[in-house]
DNA sequence: GAGTATCAGATTGTATACGTTATCAATTAA
DNA sequence: TTAATTGATAACGTATACAATCTGATACTC
């Protein structure tokens, strides 16, 4: 049973994994924690709605691991604000408040434009190629109506730019804010289409390719403002909330 | 054995604790995890040096809890970058690289001045009074030669300002960066005295009291630049590192 | 004598058992 | 009929047992 995991971390893989966990700023063992990776991806792709209950036993059974592994995974997700852990009440997918939603986007608007500026100054051929490939993947996901996958890839695009900026500490913070944005969009998004992303992202890549720092910074700023303005905090999707959840705030 | 903890979270305390954990942005149960609180404080006060081994059994025995509790505490500390967890090798106090040290201070220089500006606009009588009280505590700690305590309080001062700014998401990020700064200072600090803090902090309080946003922002910026410039990344305290630790990078 | 293989001791990783707490439906009293 | 209480069930919190892994010392080979 354990063998399954040790296989994954065979010697020739270990460097890649260590690198991956380093970039992502999480503990190495989380990379091979199926609960962590699986639930995170499901949240980023909006397959798990905000407020969804995450019973330990169910997750343990689904992923074929003991509750110990489930708990470590859920705790890690809780530190990323993707999951809420309440004592003796267990875990549920986080349900960011309008305030938290606003704050997350404010923080992104503060950090990401500067990150894009730095990325534009550093971006090389390989970086631009990787970004174009990624944009193509985003495009394909949209075309195939895989909106969840498209959203996750769209977030990943922002993380890639932060990584090109070569400031890991800030990149890690941005990655966390971007992840939380998936939940925020699930709750407060008003428009049906995310078509704007495609144009914005391509324009951003162009600016990076030209090493136009000022343009990249401004494009990122306006892109985020546009995203932010497409959120409506007054309505809020309360469909999957119980009265107790609301009173619990 | 369990009673010890349930006592702590008696009904009349629960609100305070919940509030505390909310402000600090960590899971509620961590507040009453003696390993988390104890090791965190020891690191912030530089009683635990970077690289120090943290054996699970030793901690379990010291705090009188099972290894389960020790592990959850260590995992939480690892998420805050105060502790490093390596598979099958256990935990040790984090040993931030020169690069990480530089990045942490760059991030602080980006976030904290804006936070101070916002705090100056919002600061009320109660805020100023709390800050002055805190500055007095800092002063007393310095006077009594409790440099560890002084350092921890000095960090806490920065967190308090971030909290006054009323942007929890960013305040939480700043709190994390400030915590890591204790380790960075332990490794790369060159000057013997931290006397500058006292003047800087008092000037900052004065600016907040006058609601002088521009002045507060500039004071915070220069304060951080001064701190940053007092770090020497080329030397590095390698006294408590083994060859393996170095090669492990 | 240097380097490698091996094995005991210690430490971490995982699973599971058990006690405690929450949830919810059934029952009872007003 | 409604509200409160109670008890069964399910879930979480903690401790512990056992397996896997690492470390360091000893023995062995070249």
Image (spheres, coloured by chain):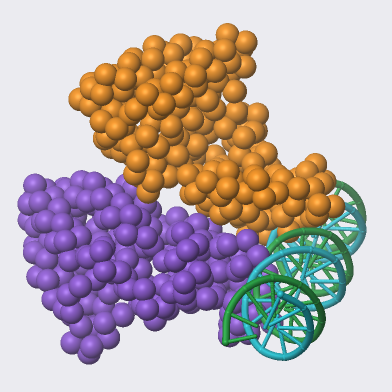
Chain colours: A purple, B orange, C cyan, D green
Q: Nearer the viewer, residue A122 or C28?
A: C28
What residue appears at the point 22 percent right and 65 percent down from the top-left corner?
A: A232
Identified at 68% across, 59% down, the residue is B88
Q: Position of residue A209 (x, y in %)?
A: 11, 59
Q: Quadrant of residue B49?
A: top right
Q: Inspect this view and state whether residue A45 appears.
A: yes
Where does the image place residue B27, in percent across and percent down from the top left?
56, 54
User: Does residue B95 sit above or below A221 in this rendering?
Assistant: above
Q: How many marks?
A: 0
* Residue B201 vertical position relative to residue B159 in the rendered view, above or below: above
- Which residue is rendered at x = 27% and y = 19% of the image? B210
In the rendered view, tell whether residue A51 sits above or below residue C25. Answer: above
Q: Nearer the viewer, residue A174 or B172?
A: B172
| Residue B164, x across and y down, in percent | 37, 34
Q: Measuring 38% from the left and 15% from the top, which residue is drawn there?
A: B202
In percent of width and height, residue B91 lies at 65, 49
A107, A219: nearer the viewer: A107
Q: Is residue C11 left or right of residue B240?
A: right
């Amino acid at each position: 049973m354990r063998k399954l995991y040790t296989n994954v971390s065979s010697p020739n893989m270990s460097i890649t994994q260590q690198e991956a966990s380093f970039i992502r700023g999480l503990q190495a063992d989380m990379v091979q924690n199926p609960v962590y990776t699986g639930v995170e991806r499901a949240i980023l792709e909006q397959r798990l709605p905000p407020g969804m209950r995450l019973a330990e036993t169910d997750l343990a059974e689904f992923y074929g691991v003991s509750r110990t592994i489930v708990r470590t995974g859920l705790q890690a997700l809780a530190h990323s604000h993707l999951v809420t852990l309440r004592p003796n009440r267990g875990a549920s997918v986080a349900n960011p408040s309008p305030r938290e939603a606003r704050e997350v986007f404010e923080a992104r608007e503060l950090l990401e434009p500067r990150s894009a500026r730095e990325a534009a100054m550093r971006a090389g051929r390989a970086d631009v190629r990787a970004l174009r490939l990624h944009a193509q993947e985003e495009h394909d996901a949209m075309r195939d109506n895989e909106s969840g996958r498209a959203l996750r890839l769209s977030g990943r695009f922002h993380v890639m730019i932060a990584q090109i900026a070569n400031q890991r500490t800030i990149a890690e913070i941005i990655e966390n804010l971007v992840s939380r944005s998936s939940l925020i969009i699930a709750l407060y998004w008003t428009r049906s289409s995310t078509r704007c992303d495609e144009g914005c992202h391509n324009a951003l890549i162009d600016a990076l390719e030209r090493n136009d720092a000022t343009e990249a910074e401004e494009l990122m700023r306006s892109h985020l403002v546009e995203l932010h303005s497409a959120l409506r905090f007054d309505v809020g999707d309360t469909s999957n909330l119980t009265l107790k959840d609301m009173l619990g705030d």
